[in-house]
DNA sequence: TTATCTGAGTTTCATTTTTGAACTTAGCTT
DNA sequence: AAGCTAAGTTCAAAAATGAAACTCAGATAA
């Protein structure tokens, strides 16, 4: 996990990725949503790109010049479960359970939640877990 | 999620909680494991306590004076799924899949993984999800 | 052509945070 | 009493942040 914290363990990177997860792609939109200083945003976007979490794409709308879009790479998208787990935690423990969003199955519309499952897909309660540290070498 | 980031969105808090999750409780042990400056550790532990993520308990070993143990509160323990998700991500995307730890069921010993499940306990693939933003008011 | 607008990025500088080291404290052991 | 140790405090130097001004490229309007 230290590896993850190295890449996203600052005040802004996680929030920037969350916005990207919600579909934000433009510099100005990140800035408006997060109130992050320009210089910091520029720096964080560049780092997230160079760490492979975001891809920087050029695009062009009619009557506007070329722009850059920052979109989640597969590596960035793979953080979704962590985002969702953090969001659920925040909702439950900081916001009295009033969730601002709902994660649903795209086709069935069912609400989805983070859980621990074994290889058979059986869910296990959180207080049933133990950590096994593997020896190195 | 912004709420979560407010509480743990700095370089050290998350790592401190991870150590706590692994069973570390003493100031010196956090320091040795993380190489975090004393003053920062003192500050972060105090903040985590005042935010209700850690409980500060007194204990006493024979031949030693009273000490403080910092142990996860239920609120802190509830971050476990987020930790595990981040750890899995770090393992897969930063460490070539070589995991240093294994999360298992305490009684059966089965390995456990983070997944998205619906209310029936059915797991859903990550690329099947959509975000539904709930209107406020 | 020239002027102006806009999104994105850079520069600058004051403020805040983090570091690392030295120092203090409480209470133990000898 | 002297020394040790875990924990905490203080403080100067280094780094990160925040706010504002400035630059740049391309689009549009006069």
Image (cartoon, coloured by chain):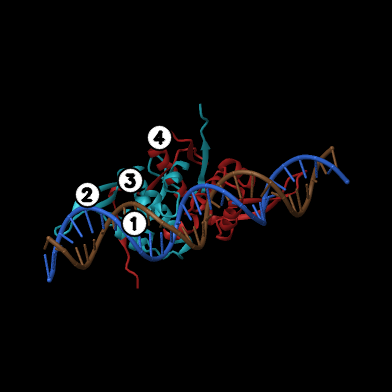
Chain colours: A cyan, B red, C brown, D blue
Q: How many neighbours does mark 2 have within 10 angstroms: few (below 14), some (14-19), or many (20 or more)?
A: few
Inspect this view and state whether residue A79 appears: yes
Disc 1 is placed on an element classified as helix
Q: How many neighbours does mark 1 have within 10 angstroms: few (below 14), some (14-19), or many (20 or more)?
A: some
Disc 2 is placed on an element classified as strand
**How many dots with numbers?**
4
Q: Work out whether mark 3 precedes mark 2 in sequence or the reverse, and give the earlier one.
A: 3
Disc 3 is placed on an element classified as helix
Name the mark on residue B97: 4
Closer to the camera: disc 2 or disc 4? 2
What residue is pinned by disc 2?
A: A58
State the CA–CA distance, disc 4 to disc 3. 22 Å
State the CA–CA distance, disc 1 to disc 3. 15 Å
What residue is pinned by disc 3?
A: A49
Q: Please state which of residues A77 and C4 is positioned toward the viewer in this rendering.
A: C4
Is A87 placed left or right of A30 in the picture?
right
Q: Which x, y percent locates residue B47? A: 57, 58
Is residue B130 positioned above or below B136 on the image?
Answer: above
Name the mark on residue A19: 1
Check contact, mark 1 vs mark 3: CB within 8 A: no
Q: Which x, y percent locates residue B69? A: 65, 50
Closer to the camera: disc 1 or disc 2? 2
Check contact, mark 4 vs mark 1: CB within 8 A: no
Q: Which x, y percent locates residue A126? A: 48, 49
């Amino acid at each position: 996990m230290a590896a993850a914290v190295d890449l996203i363990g600052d005040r802004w990177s996680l929030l920037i990725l969350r916005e990207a997860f919600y579909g934000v792609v433009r510099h100005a939109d990140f800035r408006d949503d997060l109130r992050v200083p320009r210089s910091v945003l520029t720096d964080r976007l560049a780092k997230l790109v160079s760490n492979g979490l975001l891809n920087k794409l050029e695009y062009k709308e009619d009557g506007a010049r070329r722009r850059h879009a920052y979109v989640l790479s597969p590596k960035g998208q793979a953080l979704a479960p962590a985002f969702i787990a953090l969001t659920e935690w925040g909702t439950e423990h900081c916001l009295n359970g009033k969730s601002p969003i709902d994660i649903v199955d795209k086709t069935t519309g069912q609400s989805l939640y983070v859980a621990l499952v074994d290889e058979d897909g059986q869910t296990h309660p959180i207080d049933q877990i133990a950590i096994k540290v593997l020896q190195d070498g």
